[in-house]
Amino acid sequence: MSDDATSESIRPLAPGDFPYRSRLLANLSALILLWESPTLQGQILAKSGETLDQPSHQTLRHLLAWGPMRPTALAEVLGTGASYVSKIVRRLENDGLVQRSTDPSDRRASLVQLTDAGEAAARGVYALGDRMIEEVLDGWSAADVRRYTDLTERFVADAIDAAAGMRERGLRPSEPED
Amino acid sequence: MSDDATSESIRPLAPGDFPYRSRLLANLSALILLWESPTLQGQILAKSGETLDQPSHQTLRHLLAWGPMRPTALAEVLGTGASYVSKIVRRLENDGLVQRSTDPSDRRASLVQLTDAGEAAARGVYALGDRMIEEVLDGWSAADVRRYTDLTERFVADAIDAAAGMRERGLRPSEPED
DNA sequence: ACATATACTGTCCTGCAGGACAGTAATGTG
DNA sequence: CACATTACTGTCCTGCAGGACAGTATATGT
C-alpha cells in the first residue's frame, strides 16, 4: 500500500479529547461492524495470529483507550471476575499482544499494557492498532486505502465532536481509577 | 426529543446501493462499538426487553439488511448450524422481534422477518430499528439528537461511497441465495 | 512484629452455547 | 402412487466460557 496515505493520517490526539488514542483502530472497528464483514475481520485475525474472542477484543480496546491498566480495573470495565481477566491477559501475553509489569508504586499490583507501547507512544499511537491496520491495508489497492483514510479522518472528527456533547450526559465509559 | 430531527433523516436508500435498509441502526451499531458504551447498549437492550446475545443481534442485523430470509440462509451467513438458528429464531419470536411465515412458493420453507416489516416497509425502513432508536433517543437532548443525526447522514453517505469501491474487492458480505 | 487487608493467580466446577442426529412435513420425479 | 430430496424442528450431548474459592505475595495499621 502507499504508506504515505496512512502515515499522514496517524496523528496523536490532544490528550483527554477522546478516550481513543489511536483513531484508526477505533474507526476500523466501526467499519468492520458496519459492514459486518467476516472477510475483513478474518484478515485482521489472521494477521494478529490468534482468534480474538469477545473479551480479548474488548481488553485490547480498553488498553488502547486508556493505556496501561491494572487487571482489577479491567475486570471492572469488562464486568467480569478477576480470575477470568487473569486468563485473558495470560492468553494475550502468550500471543505477544500485551505485556505485564509490576506497578512500581504497589508491587502487589501489576500493569497490563499493549506491547511496544513505549516506542509507539513516541509517535502518539499504540503499536497494536498501527501494525494490524497497516498489514491489513497492505492487501488493499491505493485507491481503497485513500478512500478509507479519508473516511476515517472525517468520521473520527465527527465522532469527537459528537462525543464532546454526549459526555456530559453520563454516557461515556466509566473512568478507570487513577 | 424533537422528532422532526429524526424523521427527516429516515429515508429509504436506493435498493441495491448498500445492504442496510435502515441507515440509522447500522450507524447506531457503529457508534455503540466506537464508544464501547455499556450504558448506551444497556439502554437499547432494556427497551427491546430482552438480553440480545451475539447471534440474536447478528440475526436481527441480517434481517434488517436483507429483509425476510429463510432459516437456512441465516444459518449460512451466521456460519452456524440450522438447528441452532431454529432456537435463535424461536427466542426472537417469543420476544416479538421477528415473525415466521411459510414461504408461499415452497411450503416446506419458512420466512423469517422483522416484526411489522410490512407497515414499516411503506416508509422504507424496518420497524425494529426505528422503534429501538426512537426510544433510545427519547432520553437524549435535542442538541444531542441533532448532532447524532448529522453524524449519521455524513457517515452513511461516506460508507456507501467507500462500499462502492470495496465491493469489487470481494469484501462484501455473501449474498443470500437467489 | 504481628495481624489484617489488598492484588493477583491457579485449580476446580457448573451452566449453557451450539453441534449431531433423528423425526416430521412438504416438494419433486418417474 | 412410491420414493428420494429438501426444509425445518426437537432432543440429546459435549466442550468450554467464566465464576467460586483457596493460595501466594505485598502493603498497611497497631
Image (tube, coloured by chain):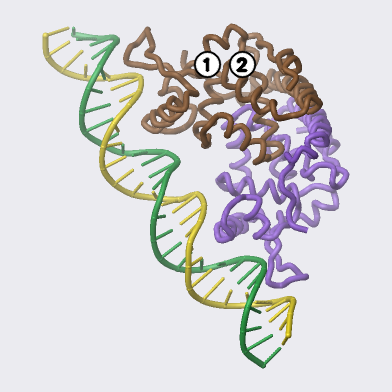
Chain colours: A brown, B purple, C yellow, D green
Where does residue A168 sit, x and y in percent of width and height? Answer: 64, 20
Residue in view at x 60 percent, y 36 percent: B41
Picture quadrant where residue B70 is located: bottom right
How would you rate the neighbour count of disc 1 (Cα within 10 Å): few for under 14, some for 14-19, many for 20 or more? some
Picture quadrant where residue B46 is located: top right
In the picture, measured across the screen, residue B98 lies left or right of residue B91, that is right
Where does residue B103 sit, x and y in percent of width and height? Answer: 74, 67
Where disc 1 sits, the SS reads loop
Where does residue B175 sit, x and y in percent of width and height? Answer: 74, 50
Q: What residue type is labelled 2?
A: Arg
Where disc 2 sits, the SS reads loop
Residue in view at x 38 percent, y 12 percent: A103
Which of these two is toward me, B87 or A35? A35
Q: Mark 1 lies on which chain?
A: A
Does the image show residue B147?
no
Q: Quadrant of the N terminus of chain B?
A: top right
Residue placed under numbered mark 1 in the picture: A67
Which of these two is toward me, D5 or C19? D5
Compared to residue C26, the image places residue D12 above or below, namely: above
Residue placed under numbered mark 2 in the picture: A21
Compared to residue A38, the image places residue A65 above or below, namely: above
Compared to residue B161, the image places residue C7 above or below, namely: above
Q: Quadrant of the C terminus of chain B?
A: bottom right
To the question of a shared chain for discs 1 and 2, the answer is yes
Residue B62: mark: none
In the picture, measured across the screen, residue B111 lies left or right of residue A170, that is right
Q: Circles 1 and 2: CB distance less than 8 Å?
A: yes
